[in-house]
Amino acid sequence: MATVPGIDVSYWDAGIDWPKVRATGQRFVIAKATEGITYKDPTFDDNWLGAKSAGLLRGAYHFFRCNVDAKKQADYFIDYVRSVKDNGELPPVLDLETNDGVTKEKIVPAVKIWLDHVEAAFGRKPIIYSGQYFLQDYLIQPGGGPPPWAKDYPLWLAQYPNQYVEGMKPFLPRGWFAWTMWQISDKGVVNGINASVDMNLFNGTLEELYKFAGATLVVEKPKTHKVAAGDSFESLANKYGVTVRELVSANPQLLKAGEPLNVPVAVAIPQDSGAGGAVTPSSPRTYTIQAGDTLTAVAVKYGTTVAAIASANDLKNINNIKVGQVLVIP
């Protein structure tokens, strides 16, 4: 069974080093945006831009409060996600965890109101995130089983095995017959994140994940790194935001000081950007640094990564750029 690893993050994971996260093999991130109608996650924009600059597919989630007006919650979420001027690649997510003292008879129509309103705003059916027992107890119709419309939404199931073994599958709630994502742990350890993090799997291949996200896998021409004393595949993978496996596959030779090393980079570009087919080679462009620019902002603007820009321009310090400086943009 093919799966693709990813994480979900919030305020509790602040200060993430996204290239290091990408180097661990993670390919997507779901970031908390809002909760109810009074909480906006203060790390959302940093996570949103940082994850994109490292080439991860991104989705935003809303923590649903069953005792708060559903349409107001949808508007609150929509406005906050739109404030970053970028809807991401993955569908929006509705996080269902607590009933807040509300009965299932009221929860079911409220959930549908949120789903319909957000779908109308973003043009995509949202993902439903929840646990097996919440869905069985609260998202059910009279007589049992989920409401008939539930099958139309991708399911992201939270369920933690004592020890995940490759090939395992989650236990589905009664009446549900397919899962799209599985949250397998809330105590994951990922390089680049100084806190426990939620670990997830997408049910499918990398190509299927990109298709689900409505994104194109853009493979840039490999950059070159001149090997220095003390370099290792691990340190270079962390620096450039690629996995050790990707780096070794592109460079089967041993590392030797002074020799060039090919650095592969992959980034996610929404299909409506005109990128076209499944794999598209990029062509170099130039950009002149303006006052207030950062490499992260430039990378996001051009749909590439900070590591790729640094490599293409031989930048030793990514924070040391000057107004008027001309950069090659991969």
Image: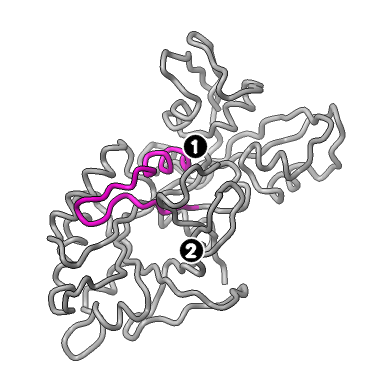
Q: Residues within 10 Å of mark 2 (few under 14, many from 20)?
A: many
Magenta highlight range: 28-53
Q: Quadrant of residue 119 in the image?
A: bottom left
| Residue 40 included in the magenta stretch of the image | yes
Q: In this view, does 110 lie above or below 10?
A: below
**Label number found at residue 232:** none
Total tally of numbered discs in the picture: 2
Q: In this view, does 96 lie above or below 329?
A: below
Read off the residue under disc 1: 53
Q: Residues within 10 Å of mark 1 (few under 14, many from 20)?
A: many
In the visual, does 299 lie left or right of 154? Answer: right
Q: Distance between the residues labelled 1 and 2?
A: 21 Å
Element on which disc 1 rests: helix
**Horizontal and vertical percent position of residue 72:** 13, 54
Residue at 53%, 52% (x, y): give it. Answer: 27
**Horizontal and vertical percent position of residue 219:** 57, 40
**Horizontal and vertical percent position of residue 32:** 36, 52
Q: Nearer the viewer, residue 33 or 179?
A: 33
| Residue 180 included in the magenta stretch of the image | no
Quadrant containing the C terminus is top right
Read off the residue under disc 2: 202
Residue at 33%, 47% (x, y): give it. Answer: 41
Residue at 16%, 87% (x, y): give it. Answer: 142
Amino acid on which the number 1 mark rests in the picture: Ser
Amino acid on which the number 2 mark rests in the picture: Phe
